[in-house]
Every structure is written in C-alpha cells, then in structure tokens.
Amino acid sequence: MIIPFLLLILAFSGFFLRIWIVGPDKEKLSDDGNELNIKVKLILGLIGLISVIVIMIADGVQGMGMKWFWIVFIIISLGFQSFIDWKFLKHTKQHIVSLILLVEGVVLVYFLF
C-alpha cells in the first residue's frame, strides 16, 4: 500500500521540480539518447519485475529485502535517468531534477517503508 503513495509523491514532486528548475517546456532527447533510454528502461523493468516476484516469494511484501530492493532500484533507475539527461541534454538542468528525485525517493523509502 505504501509503494503507490511513494510513486505518487515522486511523480508530483518531479513535475513541480521540473517546472521550477528547468521551466515549463521539456526538451526532447536526441534519437540516440531516446533509443538508449528506452532500451535500458525496458531491461531495468524486466529485471525489476523478476526481482520483485522473487523477493515477494522469499521475504514477503513488507520484508527488509523489499525495502532494500526499492532503494537499489530507485538509485539505479534515477541515476541512469540523471546520466542520460546530463549526457544528451547538456544545456539544461534536467539532470538536477533527477538527482533530487533520487535522494527524495531513497529517503522516503528508507523512512516510510
């Protein structure tokens, strides 16, 4: 029950941080960046889905394994997003938004899960 709440908080704060730091217009990634972004997110999604199923079977939904899975998953996924934003959108500050969301997500999962 706490995961949808955390995702909702991160989505709203990401939206407001992007408007506050970057501005209302979001830049598009280049074709190379967009292709790499999609491929890596699909791979992360599949690995994450398989890992969640294994952890739920082994440790349960509210176990410490699930908490640390979400912390690691947030670090990897938002760290990658920050890298992609930094690499392919050099003239914007979009990567700062991803880094702030990374820290916020880890803190929320650590203290609320």
Image: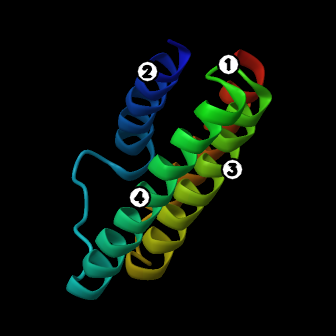
Near-viewer residue (106 or 41):
41
| Sequence order check, earlier mark of 3 and 2 | 2
Q: In the shown orientation, is residue 58 left or right of residue 52?
A: right
For label 3, the crowd category at 10 Å Cα-Cα, with few meaning under 14, some 14 to 19 and many 20 or more, is few
Disc 1 to disc 3, C-alpha distance: 16 Å
Circles 1 and 3: CB distance less than 8 Å? no
The location of residue 59, given as percent across then percent down, is 72, 30
In the image, residue 84 sits, relative to residue 4, either above or below, namely below
Task: Please give the residue where the numbered disc 4 appears in the rendered image.
Answer: 46
| Sequence order check, earlier mark of 4 and 3 | 4
Image quarter where the C terminus lies is top right
Residue at x 26% of width, y 75% of height: 34
Task: Please give the residue where the numbered disc 3 appears in the rendered image.
Answer: 72
Circles 4 and 3: CB distance less than 8 Å? no
Task: Please give the residue where the numbered disc 2 appears in the rendered image.
Answer: 4
Q: Which element type, helix, strand or loop, lies under badge 4? A: helix
Disc 4 to disc 3, C-alpha distance: 15 Å
Disc 1 to disc 4, C-alpha distance: 21 Å
Disc 2 to disc 1, C-alpha distance: 14 Å
The location of residue 66, given as percent across then percent down, is 67, 33
The location of residue 54, given as percent across then percent down, is 59, 43
The location of residue 1, given as percent across then percent down, is 50, 12
Residue at x 46% of width, y 30% of height: 13
Task: Please give the residue where the numbered disc 1 appears in the rendered image.
Answer: 62
Circles 2 and 1: CB distance less than 8 Å? no
